[in-house]
Image (cartoon, rainbow, N blue to C red):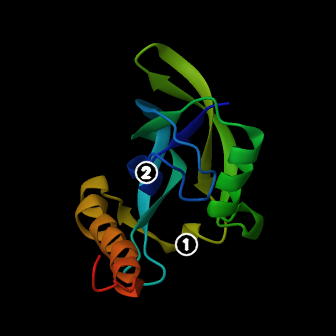
């Protein structure tokens, strides 16, 4: 199975949701959808997509995804609670059109969309903060023996 990702998951070679398998990503475009920023809680910076004619969403295509990995993505996207829902779509890649699953804004998150989501802003702000937060506590928690 193929999965089209268009937000924070474009920046990770390993799925944040815990699938734990490194997957190559290729550039892909989804026609007829628009990407919005979601700002709930305030300061959050993640995207949703909704069907909207005349727009396209640039993202990445992950191939050879297993059912278990797709389920892990559903957990990460909180499909069960209505934040997103899984939908099969047609995306364009360098070899033509392919079918892929993606996460569409669900009813509980749609009201919080505010303007366009910026991959560049995410990379500059949120991604750097996430990396700093994940590295610093590990380094601080390690006790170093005098001779290490």
Which residue is denoted by mark 2 in the rendering? 12
- Residue 65 higher or lower than 92, as above or below: below
- Residue 90 higher or lower than 58, as above or below: above
Percent of width and height locating residue 17: 60, 59
Q: CA distance from mark 1 to mark 2?
A: 27 Å
Residue in front for this viewpoint, 132 or 52? 132
Which residue is denoted by mark 1 in the rendering? 111
Q: Secondary structure at mark 1?
A: helix
Residue 47 seen = yes
Percent of width and height locating residue 124: 22, 63
Q: Around disc 2, counting alpha carbons within 10 Å, would you say few (fewer than 14), some (14 to 19), or many (20 or more)?
A: few
Residue in front for this viewpoint, 10 or 135? 135
Q: Residue at coordinates 50% horizontally, 49% vertically from top-left?
A: 14
What label sits on residue 144 in the rendered view? none
Residue 31 seen = no
Quarter that holds the C terminus: bottom left
Q: Residue at coordinates 53% horizontally, 58% vertically from top-left?
A: 16
**Which quadrant holds residue 72?**
bottom right
Q: Secondary structure at mark 2?
A: loop
**Which quadrant holds residue 76?**
bottom right
């Amino acid at each position: 199975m193929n999965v089209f990702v268009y937000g924070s998951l474009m920046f990770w070679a390993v799925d944040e949701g815990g699938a734990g398998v490194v997957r190559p990503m290729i550039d892909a475009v989804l026609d007829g959808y628009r990407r919005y920023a979601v700002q709930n809680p305030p300061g959050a910076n993640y995207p949703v997509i909704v069907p909207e004619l005349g727009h396209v969403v640039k993202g990445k295509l992950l191939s050879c995804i297993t059912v278990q990995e797709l389920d892990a993505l559903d957990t990460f996207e909180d499909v069960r609670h209505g934040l997103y829902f899984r939908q099969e779509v047609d995306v364009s890649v360098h070899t033509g059109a392919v079918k892929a699953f993606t996460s569409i804004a669900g009813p509980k998150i749609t009201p919080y969309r505010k303007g366009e989501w910026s991959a560049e802003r995410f990379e500059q702000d949120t991604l750097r903060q996430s990396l700093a937060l994940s590295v610093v506590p590990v380094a601080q928690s390690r006790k170093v023996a005098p001779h290490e």
